[in-house]
Amino acid sequence: MTEGRLFFIGVGVWFYRWFLYWFLKRCERRKEDPSRLEAAFLHGLFYGAVGVLLSVTVYAYLGYVRGFTNIGLLGGICGFWFGVAAGYWKASKTKAKEEMLSIDLEWAQTASSAVILASVIMYTLVQAFKIPSGSMQPTLYEGDHLFVNKFYYGVKIPFTEKRLFRVRNAHSTDIVVFKFPTEDRSNQHYGKDFIKRAIAVAGDVVAIRNKTVFVNDRPLGAEPYTQFVDSRSFPRFSGEQVGLTPKEYQDAWQNAELAYVLRGEEIRDNFGPVRVPDGHYFVLGDNRDASFDSRFWGPLPESYLKGKAWFLYWPPNRIKVIR
């Protein structure tokens, strides 16, 4: 679940807490007891919020991005009606009604503060992340759990491209977590978090020749963190061979169109040269033969950067600081 969704769930629980507090105080002033239906309805609202939180949390943990609104709505409706039924049954006595709503108020007070605080921590400091694929082997394996340091590259001001309290910019060889760079909701990767290794920064010229990466005409060398699972090396297809000038090749790459002009195998092992535009990064997976990265979808805009991979905490036998 993203920190934004978590924050709004927390705000919703806070409003419920405020309304329930006002309702109980009103009953106290008027020396009236809430009716059985009122108590059941309020109890249902609390369980509806719980249903939303549980359903989207499980949905996110399973790795899904699309359909959060629908699954949250479904969880909320199920939770609401369960709470109404349970509340109506519990509220058969006056004292039981008051006790039930007082407990709901206590839980709402705790939950709203905890959820909002957790969302702020996730947005500004540290967020847990689960490796979704094998594209970073042998450094990270599918299913690994790690913490992402979101403070390192600066705290992003909501609805802007500005960052505050930046420690430093992303450097070459940093392992970075980012939202897949597209605003096309029909794209199957829209909204998903990716993890790759930064290879080059703005202004660098990148080329790949027979699986060796060159940055500014200098080979990166052995790159001990990489893995090659395919012994084949597909031949080089230059832009000129398919009717692209160097500028058209650069533009096609920047616009995430190169993989439609050339087949994947034509740019996997031999690629470029391209220049990384200002405010962007060139990222690759350590598992070079099985990684969907900047070779195929273009440069990574800094605005999509979420943080630096920091600490692997699960499984226990692989606990380590990530480098």
Image: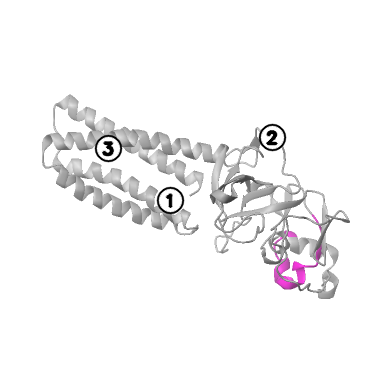
The residue at the far left in this view is 93
Circle 2 crowding by C-alpha within 10 Å: few under 14, some 14–19, many from 20 = few
**In terms of image quadrants, where is residue 194?**
bottom right
Name the spot of residue 61 as percent of width and height, x first: 47, 54
> Which residue type does callout 3 highlight?
Asp
Disc number placed over residue 167 in the picture, else none? 2
Residue at 19% in and 50% down: 85
Structural distance between the alpha carbons of marks 3 and 1 = 21 Å
Q: Amino acid at mark 2?
A: Val
Residue at 18%, 34% in the rendered image: 98
Residue occupying image coordinates x 56% and y 64%: 188
Asked if the magenta segment contains residue 129, the reply would be no
Q: Residue furthest right?
A: 217
- Distance between the alpha carbons at the discs numbered 1 and 2: 31 Å
Residue extending farthest to the front is 317
Describe the element under mark 1 as helix, strand or loop: helix
Magenta span of residues: 254-275
Mark 3 vs 1, N-terminal side: 1
Mark nearer the N terminus (1 vs 2)? 1
Contact? badges 3 and 2 (CB < 8 Å):
no
Q: Secondary structure at mark 2?
A: loop
Residue pointed to by mark 1: 57
Q: Point out the residue furthest to the top here.
A: 29
* Residue receiving disc 3: 104
Q: Position of 2 compared to 206: left or right?
A: left
Is residue 273 visible to the viewer in this orientation of the structure?
Answer: no
Image x and y of residue 292, in percent: 66, 63
